[in-house]
Amino acid sequence: MKDFLVILFVALGGALVVAVPGWFVLRAIRHRSILVHLLVLLAITLLAVFAGIFGVARGMFISEHDLKVLLIVLSLAGAVSLGVGVWLGRRLAAAAMWADEVRLRERQMEANRRELVAWVSHDLRTPLAGLRAMAEALEDGVVGDPETIADYHRRIRVEADRMASLVDDLFELSRINAGALRLSLASVSLGDVVSDAVASATPVAAARGVRLVAAETGWPTVQGSEPELSRVVANLLRNAIRHTPSDGTVTLTGGQDGAGGWLAVTDGCGGIPPADLPRVFDVAFRGGSARTPATTVGEGGGGGLGLAIVRGLVEAHRGQVAVSNVDGGCRFVVSLPA
């Protein structure tokens, strides 16, 4: 019994000689990575075992040969433990980083959802109030001259079209976010897509006094779905026209590089504040004061969904979209697989 108590106290004392300083070391590195914490913890544990066993072995007068064998075995076991610790530490660090990214992405999505609901509620409340007022005026006979009645009918149609466009954007965005978007990929000529989009947007641009200039040559052929690519170009054009002042120019260019084809839309918006550039493609983002607001009757300021849809559709094609400021405006570049 006496020998057992001696062994117990010697082993405990040797372990404490290492464990107590190790506790202070762990406190000092509490802001370091998971991998560092795990390695230090393993090292403290192994050194505590070494100290306890070495103290007991010396007290029991173990031969030098037996002590050397014991230390070799412990060294090998410690090396294996540290190797496993490094492997597990890296996996735990990667898992922790992934979990942090997931939580951050969830918080961003929740913030975007709240902002989207607020914007959509505002965008629907205003035209609905106008529609109701005009409908009541027509129903009660407040307006009677044909010209005013025709103007009310026109305004009702314009507001209805704008709300229908907003609902279409919401539906498209929900398909993208839900992963329900299915693309029918084929070889698509960006020149044909741009030509159709320019023809469709020309009346709107002319009403605002904006010139549309599209390159006649250099358009690549890309792998994509023509309806979705048409939506991408149409949204970029509509955004560029909305934020370009009268007598301004919107330019469309394209080309091909080693990664595939690209399309660029350059407007005359006056530039986007650098702090807002990373948020341009966020849901419900509408830009800052540097961008020219819409003034055309019935056009509104947009639902803040067009560029978010552009990013979703481009990424669904395994492409990328980016924006940068240029002289007098900004430039949106869409890169797609060849």
Image: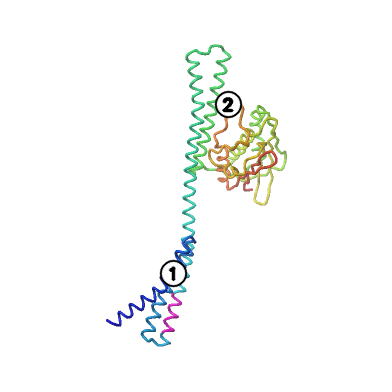
* Mark 2, secondary structure of its residue: loop
Q: Which span is picked out in magenta?
A: 67-77
Was residue 68 drawn as part of the magenta stretch in this picture?
Answer: yes
- Nearer the camera: disc 2 or disc 1: 1
Residue 293, how many percent across, how many down?
61, 32
Give the amino acid type for the residue marked by disc 1 in the picture. Answer: Gly
Other-residue count near label 2 (Cα within 10 Å), few / some / many at <14 / 14–19 / ≥20:
some
Q: Quadrant of the N terminus?
A: bottom left
Q: Residue at x 53, y 13 (%)?
A: 143
Give the amino acid type for the residue marked by disc 2 in the picture. Answer: Gly
Other-residue count near label 1 (Cα within 10 Å), few / some / many at <14 / 14–19 / ≥20:
some
Relative to 56, say whether 250 is above or below: above
In the displayed structure image, the side of residue 194 where residue 304 appears, left or right: left
Residue at which label 1 appears:
22
Residue at which label 2 appears:
298
Residue 326, how many percent across, how many down?
68, 42
